[in-house]
Image (tube, rainbow, N blue to C red):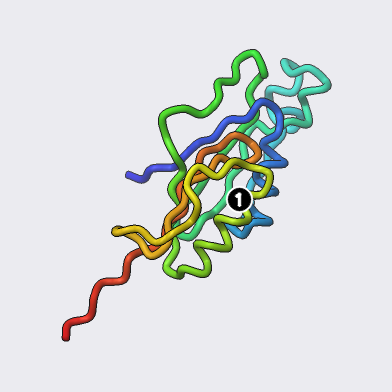
Amino acid sequence: MRLTPHLTFPGHCEAAFNFYEACQVGKVVTMVRYGDSPLREQTSSEWRKKVLHATMTVGTGELVGADVLVEEYQPPQGFFVLLTTDEVGEAQRVFQSLAEEGTVLMAAQKTFWSPCFGVLVDRFGIPWEVSCEQKPARPE
């Protein structure tokens, strides 16, 4: 088994995934539009350019997303997408990039469980936690 977060957007999935790629969260590998799918004829002409399915590789995992009709869209609630790095500098850089035009809920900082941890909601309304792995103490 594997767990893959699937994000939905009210029409701006492509912009969000391009933003995440620019933030170096991962690499977009799939971007299928409604107009390029068997749903083309069932889809209004203005919605055909919207994203039916997007996939981004993130390290050894994936993040997927899609646009849903505005009247069917529900804002994210009750979860955060946790992005973990091995380096403090990388965690700080990704946090600052994702926070651009978003809302910082907890500034990236040292905590008792991480040398760098921060919480934000990005400009697309997606809640993120960015964390750096705590390196185990070396034996004396």
Residue 13: image location, x then y, percent:
67, 36
Amino acid identity at mark 1:
Leu
Is residue 111 left or right of 18 when viewed as pictured?
Answer: left
The residue tagged 1 is: 98
Residue 11: name its quadrant.
top right
Q: Position of residue 88 (x, y in %)?
A: 46, 68
Name the residue rendered at 64%, 46% in the picture. Answer: 30
Q: Residue at x 24, y 75 (%)?
A: 137
Q: Which residue is more in the foreground, 35 or 100?
A: 100
- Report the quarter where the N terminus lies: top left
Residue 42 percent coordinates (x, y): 72, 15
Name the quadrant containing residue 7.
Answer: top right
Judge the density around disc 1: few (<14), some (14-19), many (≥20) Cα neighbours within 10 Å.
Answer: many
Quadrant in the picture for the C terminus: bottom left
Taking the spot 68% from the left edge, 44% from the top edge, the residue there is: 101
Q: Nearer the viewer, residue 100 or 10?
A: 100
Residue 125 image point, x, y percent: 59, 34
Image height of 46 relative to 54, above or below = above
Q: Is residue 36 left or right of residue 73?
A: right
